[in-house]
Amino acid sequence: MPKIKIPHKTPRVDMTPMVDLFSLLLTFFMLTATMRPSEPAPIDTPFSVSETPQPDANVMTMVISAEGKVFFNIDNGPDTILHFRPKILEEMGKRYNIQFTGDELRKFEKYSSSFGVDIKNLKTFLSAREPSEREKLEKGIPMDTLDNQLAYWVLYAREVNPAVKVLIKGDSNADYPVVKKVLDILQDKNVNRFSLITSLEVVQVVDAKK
């Protein structure tokens, strides 16, 4: 009696679920990812061999351009419900007798890039519609002896968020007196620990046996 041959079917791999999952993940990352804000001035950072990563939250950054302008930035902390940025701006407003509206506070909170504007011109800066209008106002944070606004930004940032870490991003061609002035302000506000943002330099390892 002949054997019954069982038909063999070629297995078929259905890629539809995988494609759907990939599309879902891609959409999720596109909606939740945040673009790195552009700096108000081009900064050519010096090189170093340190690979310490830059923290994502609780960061206060001071940017020093080659022209000697100083820009300031502070993030909202690890949770956006903390609203650190508008709280800091409110404190600055009290110091300079400037009343910021709710809409202006929200605009300041959403403006994630560094800024170098006199507090007296910040209302005009926030209401500007074109980047060119903002650029005209960005002459650097005042930090002279008569009106040291940078010192107050540092003070209120640390009062609102005591866990904040200080980063300095300076151009390699920045004048030393400007850098020293920023460091003096930090020390005056009892900030003795800070990190420098640099570009990673590739180091070639030479074999001594060759």
Image: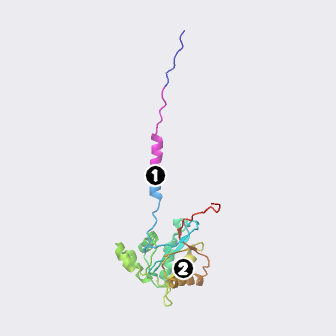
Above or below 107: residue 178: below
Q: Which residue is mark 2?
A: 154
Is 156 left or right of 131, judged from the image as shown?
right
Q: Residue furthest front?
A: 210
Does the image show residue 122?
yes
Under mark 1, the amino acid is Leu
Q: CA distance from mark 2 to mark 1?
A: 38 Å
State the image coordinates of residue 54 (x, y, percent, origin top left): 55, 67
Under mark 2, the amino acid is Val
Q: Residue at x 52, y 83 (%)?
A: 176
Q: How is the image coloured?
A: rainbow
Q: Residue furthest top?
A: 1
Q: Nearer the viewer, residue 205 or 137?
A: 205
Dominant secondary structure of the residues highlighted in magenta in the image? helix
State the image coordinates of residue 110 (x, y, percent, origin top left): 44, 69
Q: Residue at x 48, y 26 (%)?
A: 9
Above or below 21: residue 66: below
Label 2, secondary structure: give it: helix
Q: Which label sits on residue 26?
A: 1
Could you tell me which quadrant the N terminus lies in? top right
Q: Which residues are magenta?
A: 9-27
Query: Mark 2: few, some, or many residues within 10 Å (few <14, many ≥20)?
Result: many
State the image coordinates of residue 15 (x, y, percent, origin top left): 46, 39
The picture quadrant where one finds residue 41 is: bottom left
Say if the magenta span includes residue 92: no
Q: Nearer the viewer, residue 204 or 123?
A: 204
Query: Mark 1: few, some, or many residues within 10 Å (few <14, many ≥20)?
Result: few
Query: Which of the two discs, 2 and 1, labels the residue nearer the N terminus?
Result: 1
Q: Residue at x 51, y 20 (%)?
A: 6
Label 1, secondary structure: give it: helix
Q: Residue furthest bottom?
A: 146
Say if the magenta span includes residue 10: yes
